[in-house]
Amino acid sequence: MDSSNNWRERLFVMIFQSDTRAGRRFDGILLLIILASLVVVMLDSIDSIHQNYAGLLAYIEWGFTAIFLGEYILRLYCSPKPLRYAFSFYGLVDLLAIVPGILALYYSDAQYLLIIRIIRMLRIFRVLKLSPYLKQANYLMSALRGSKQKIVVFLVSVCTLVTVFGTLMYVIEGPEHGFTSIPKGIYWAIVTLTTVGFGDIVPKTPLGQVISSLVMITGYSIIAVPTGIFTAELANAMRGEQLQHDCPVCQKKSHEQSAAFCSRCGNALFKKVE
């Protein structure tokens, strides 16, 4: 019984924990297998390769499926709470990694399962929980949280702009020039404001062309705004300019690095040692 428990504990450390040598080695091998399976999926989507090597690619896919199935069973075996793991986000992703290969055994043409097989890419995020990547991911998450409100305000402003410009173009150009509805005009405004410019709908009247020029200039002016907001927050997160220390009185969490007193209530952040 003890040897069995020791074996399960060793498996758990190797499979679920990435801060050990065995765990890093396991995650590295798993990452290579995931990337190889994605390459096979991409090759299988090319019609000429699929027609000439469909059988070989199917055998390779079954091999990957067997590996992922074995890994999934091992995770269930060594997990302290197998059901909790099975119904977790990563547990469901791990299950989806083996479903296409199993279904392919019963359906000869499983091309429609390509989208499910591509979901295996999500498993890379499990591997990237390694400590060096996790630290960088924390920087990104901190920057996203800090810039969330600013970006939401920016997106609301952009939505207002494209609605106004789209409605104007619908009124000015009309259905005879391709602006058959306000949503069609909003679509044109989004394409123009983002400087994509598909060219499927173009203004023909002089006034419409003037408005188009304004939309394009506006697009160049604001397209870098969310990038600048996120970059500034990311720089702040990486420099560590804020000290995460709760004020003992008002519980304010963020303070300047050199601050000795709370900027909200004025009380000392640190107690004097007598």
Image (tube, grey):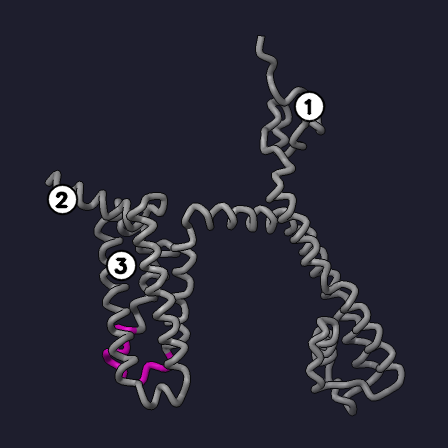
Determine the CA span between mark 3 and mark 1.
52 Å
Compared across the picture, whether 165 is left or right of 93 comes to right
Of the residues shown, which amino acid type is indicated by label 1?
A: Phe
In the rendered image, the quadrant that contains the C terminus is top right
- Residue at x 26%, y 53% (from the top left corner): 75
- Residue at x 84%, y 76% (from the top left corner): 213
Q: Position of residue 189 (x, y in %)?
A: 74, 75
In the rendered image, the quadrant that contains the N terminus is top left
SS class of the residue under badge 3? helix
Dot 3: within a 10 Å radius of its alpha carbon, few (fewer than 14), some, or many (20 or more) residues? some
Q: Position of residue 226 (x, y in %)?
A: 69, 58
- For label 1, the residue is 261
- Residue at x 36%, y 60% (from the top left corner): 31
Looking at the image, is mark 3 or mark 1 earlier in the sequence?
A: 3
Is 223 placed above or below 13 here? below
On the image, which quarter does residue 247 sit in? top right
Looking at the image, is mark 3 or mark 2 earlier in the sequence?
A: 2
- For label 3, the residue is 72
Compared across the picture, whether 122 is left or right of 8 comes to right
Determine the CA span between mark 3 and mark 2.
19 Å
Specify start and end residues of the magenta stretch as a single range: 101-112
Determine the CA span between mark 2 and mark 1.
55 Å
Dot 2: within a 10 Å radius of its alpha carbon, few (fewer than 14), some, or many (20 or more) residues? few
